[in-house]
Image (cartoon, rainbow, N blue to C red):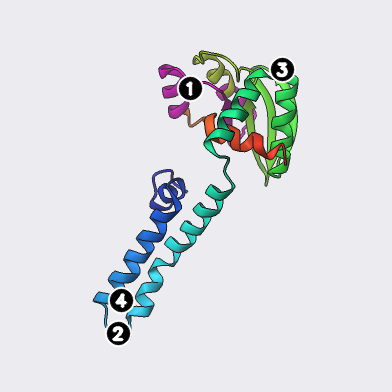
Amino acid sequence: MAQNSLFAILLRSRWYLSFALAAGVTLVCMLTLPAHIAPFGALAATPLWVVGGIAAWRQLRAPSPAQVERLLAESAALPWRSFAQQLETAWRAEGYSVQLLNQGGVDFRLERAGQTTMVSAKRWKAALHGVEPLRELEAARIRESAAKAVYVALQPLGENAALYARDQQLVVLGGADLAALLAKSRN
């Protein structure tokens, strides 16, 4: 799904926005279409109801801001092996097969449904994240013909690194997304 499509935006937004939009589409159809056609026109809002339900489910299961802060603080205090074990457990819970690599800027190889993802996570505690580790990750992604590359970072990337990650379509896993992943390792 395109990142800026209506459905992608609604999935990232609060759940009630999708429901409000669906209710608005339904209301407009009921008020403007002839009575015998209006119910069928209102069915056009069905995808919006579904997206609202998916967003609600995701947001219900997401960690609270206090849990996010606690999980990230705990992660910052962990040694690499413990942090790597938590990541591995969480990705296995999501259905990935996980291989620990520790080679050339890449720490994990994830595979699921025939797609490979390369992950760099060893610099998760770094205060500054430059472009070089991202270049190594991208080179490994190309070398391995992987579909995606993920860079794990507790702190936000520097401006140049963020631009590079965006341009190369690297996924930066941090903040609430990282906390949600780590929460799966505890279930």
Q: CA distance from mark 4 to mark 2?
A: 7 Å
Q: Which residue is under mark 4?
A: 30
Secondary structure under tag 3 reads loop
Res. 35 mark = 2
x and y, in percent, of residue 38 in the image: 33, 79
Q: Is residue 95 above or below residue 72?
A: below
**In the figure, residue 43 lies in which quadrant?**
bottom left
Q: CA distance from mark 1 to mark 4?
A: 47 Å
- The three-letter code of the residue at mark 1 reads Pro
Is residue 157 visible to us here?
yes
**Sequence-first disc among 4 and 3:** 4
Q: CA distance from mark 3 to mark 2?
A: 66 Å
**Sequence-first disc among 1 and 4:** 4
**In the figure, residue 123 lies in which quadrant?**
top right
x and y, in percent, of residue 90 in the image: 70, 37
Q: Residue at x 67, y 47 (%)?
A: 113
Q: Residues within 10 Å of mark 2 (few under 14, many from 20)?
A: few
Q: Which residue is under mark 3?
A: 79
**Sequence-first disc among 3 and 1:** 3
Q: Is residue 41 above or below residue 76?
A: below
x and y, in percent, of residue 138 in the image: 55, 24
Secondary structure under tag 1 reads loop
Q: Is residue 108 above or below residue 15?
A: above
Please report the bounds of the magenta region as a residue range: 138-167
Q: CA distance from mark 4 to mark 3?
A: 59 Å
Q: Is residue 176 above or below residue 152?
A: below
Q: Residue at x 37, y 60 (%)?
A: 20
Res. 16 mark = none
x and y, in percent, of residue 61 in the image: 59, 47
Q: Which residue is under mark 1?
A: 156
